[in-house]
Amino acid sequence: MINRNFSTLPSLPVRVIARLDVKKPNVVKGINLEGLRIVGDPGVLAKKYQQQGVDELIFIDSVASLYKRNTVFEVIENVAKRLRVPFTVGGGISSIEGVSTLLNKGADKVLINTAAVNNPKLIQEAAKIFGSQCLVISIEAKYNKKANKWIAYTDNGRENTNIDVFKWAQEVEALGAGEIFITSIDNDGMQNGFDIDLCRQIIDLTKLPVIVSGGGGCLDDVLEVVRSCSPSGVALGSLLHYGKTDVGQVKTFLSSHTVNVRPV
């Protein structure tokens, strides 16, 4: 385990990221990755968050792996030309060809979960061909009380892999992943705070940049996870989609509490 003294860590800017879960043709949001509700148009929301000063965008096709389809490709074609901020795309990517297609359509990074679990060598192959910097591994985590451990899930939180989350995080780092995107299924959409223990353990176990997701319901929640865990980025969905705040307000609030963020 890596011992981190947060008071002495380099003060790199924390990235404020908008997470857009897509179920063609809409952005949707649910609770615990279920019960999806329409919250807007991908292009309209992406443009709005860009104007607010978001650092990055993450588009995830929420049902791609389940239905073995890649409809997010079409969404990206429609929005890529209008974006000036880096964006990541995930959902249904299961091959080197899929990674190549998304990068050629303008994505800066690709996000992989199900395919990486089913074929870990895909991480190694993609990193070798395209570079680790564009490869983000999504880990959807749920706490199993009976087993007393965190389990990795796939298919947008539908399939239990029985894989220990922390061992999997270490494995994807060894295979060549460039970043980890960790989501607490239990907290996702609940808007009652991030799972601090989960986030902290993932960040302590790996040298990779880690984006935390799932549970942000107010500005204090964002500040708490940043101060407690020192993530590379914080991905926000409900907090932004439902108009509880905007990207500029998030950055202003963090900055007022001495957190280093990029200017709007």
Image (spheres, rainbow, N blue to C red):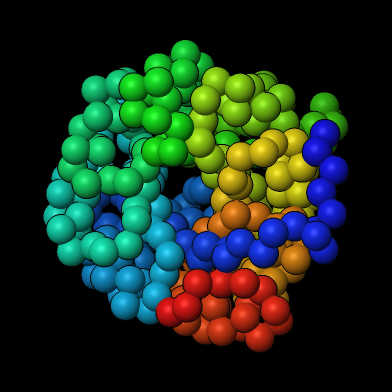
Where, quadrant-wise, is the C terminus in this rendering? bottom left
Answer with left or right where residue 68 lies relative to residue 236. Answer: left
Answer with left or right where residue 241 lies relative to residue 261. Answer: left
Camera-nearest residue between 28 and 220? 220
Where, quadrant-wise, is the N terminus in this rendering? top right
Q: Establish if 78 lies above or below 95.
A: below
Q: Residue at x 25, y 37 (%)?
A: 102
Residue 161 locus on image (x, y percent): 60, 22
Answer with left or right where residue 5 lies relative to residue 46. Answer: right
Camera-nearest residue between 239 and 97? 97
Q: Establish if 199 lies above or below 261.
A: above
Q: Is residue 51 visible?
A: yes
Q: Is residue 115 visible?
A: no
Residue 223 locus on image (x, y percent): 69, 72
Residue 238 locus on image (x, y percent): 50, 67
Camera-nearest residue between 56 and 149? 56
Q: Residue at x 61, y 62 (%)?
A: 12
Answer with left or right where residue 159 lies relative to residue 68. Answer: right
Residue 192 picture quarter = bottom right
Residue 50 picture quarter = bottom left
Residue 33 locus on image (x, y percent): 52, 48
Q: Residue at x 56, y 72 (%)?
A: 261
Q: Establish if 117 lies above or below 224.
A: above
Q: Residue at x 75, y 66 (%)?
A: 227
Question: How many numbered callouts?
Answer: 0
Camera-nearest residue between 154 and 259? 259
